Image: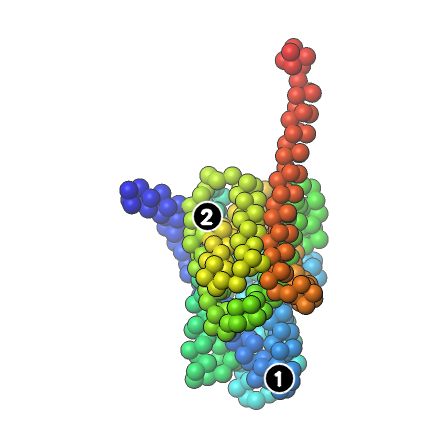
Amino acid sequence: MVDRIRIPFLSAYRPVLTDKRYSRLISASAVSFLGDGMALVGIPWLAIQLAKPDQGGVVAGLSLAAYTLPGALGALALGRWFGGLSAQKLVVASTGLRALGLATIAILAATDRLNAFSYIALLAASSLFSAWGNAGLYAIVSQLFADGRQLPANALLSVSQQISIIIGPAIAGMILLQLNGSAILAVNAGSYLILLTTVAHLKLPQQLAATRRTGVMAGFRILAQRPQLASLLLITAVFFFLYGPVEIGLPLYVAGNLAGSGQLLGAFWTAFGVGAVIGGFAGGALARAPRWPAVIAIIFGWGLTLLPFGMTDSTSATMTSFALGGLIYGPFPAFTISLFQQAADASELTSVLAARSAVTTTATPLGAALGGPLVTLWGAADTLLYSGIATITLAALVTASMLLLNRSTLRGEVKDLPREVKL
């Protein structure tokens, strides 16, 4: 019985892992993701060290935002110059800028010439190409696997990111026992150089010539001509926005309702991460699963897992529910990326994926920004509860819309049938 379960699961990943180019890509990506996982600790820690005594929280928050949000601005502003580049060149440009920015921070810190302003500015500059780099990475996967193997290939990338969130902070903590936060960023710079070198030397299938429609705005115009993709992007953005308050509400719920410590908060996120890794692996093996129903089910299931936070102050119950939330969410990135890869032309894929990244990278921070006032108004527990209810409502609205659309389409098809067929 065990063999019957294991073989189909492993067989989904064997065809992608046996591709030497993908094996090198996923290995280098995993190293880069691990560097980013370490940066989750290193960036705010160094920010606190650089800030004045009463400004540590503000500088830490700005630093973390600077590491991600400018990527959306870069996606919108730099499309004219980057939209026509190959996926390979996009990843090289993104990883090169990130490595340069992080290495500069480490050097300035080592020579005592780094201050809070220059630190935030360098982090922001290093992230300007990040949306294009992310788009290029998944476009390379699409070039390597033009068939059903895209889903497991995407899933392994997603799982690598989740694993890095679990392992990276622990490694960073060990580094901080002997060194400061700049050492972590130096290691992260090295991890990006590894990815840069690997991608630069990949021999990829010849890419189709890019169309004249390049850049993020072109990506949005392409999406407008594909209603299903535009709908998927809108749904994903709303889903991520509704998740945003969780990042604010959970720490306050742990500290207030559970009277817990930072270690307990870390345990919650570890539980989520472990669940997401398992769910991501399982989702990657479901190549025949219908994508749209799976996406809706994931949104609905995640909303359900937030409801216990508003109903109980039991640590075991809420942590179990949060781990289940990670398990349910795990396949979401791979499923949605696969839908974009399958629907967009190869010559348009990087522009479409960059447009997607520009939207998704801003949705969660905007939701988190709203989460602060909501927690003040409702309290942490009710904020998490209402986030879950709103997410369930989103899934219900999407389901109802799809049923109405299918019914309308079916009526139109019946109306167009010849009279003798109708009878």
Near-viewer residue (79 or 338): 338
Q: How many marks?
A: 2
Q: Which residue is tagged 2?
A: 283
Quadrant showing the N terminus: top left
Provide the secondary structure element on which disc 1 rests: loop
Mark 1 → mark 2, Cα distance in angstroms: 43 Å
**Mark 2 crowdedness (10 Å alpha carbons): few <14, some 14-19, many ≥20:** many
Residue at x 68% of width, y 58% of height:
79
Against 130, is 345 above or below? Answer: above
* Residue type, mark 1 in image: Ala
Quadrant showing the C terminus: top right
Residue 159 shows in the view? no
| First reached walking from the N terminus: tag 1 or tag 2 | 1
Image coords of residue 289 (percent x, y): 48, 40
Residue at x 69% of width, y 20% of height:
415
Against 191, is 277 above or below? Answer: above
Against 132, is 284 above or below? Answer: above
Q: Is residue 293 left or right of residue 279?
A: right
Image coords of residue 349 (percent x, y): 60, 49
Near-viewer residue (148 or 363): 363
Residue 398 shows in the view? yes
Asked if the residue at tag 2 contacts the one at tag 1, i.e. Cβ–Cβ closer than 8 Å, the answer is: no
Q: Which residue is tagged 1?
A: 51
Q: Quadrant of residue 278?
A: bottom left
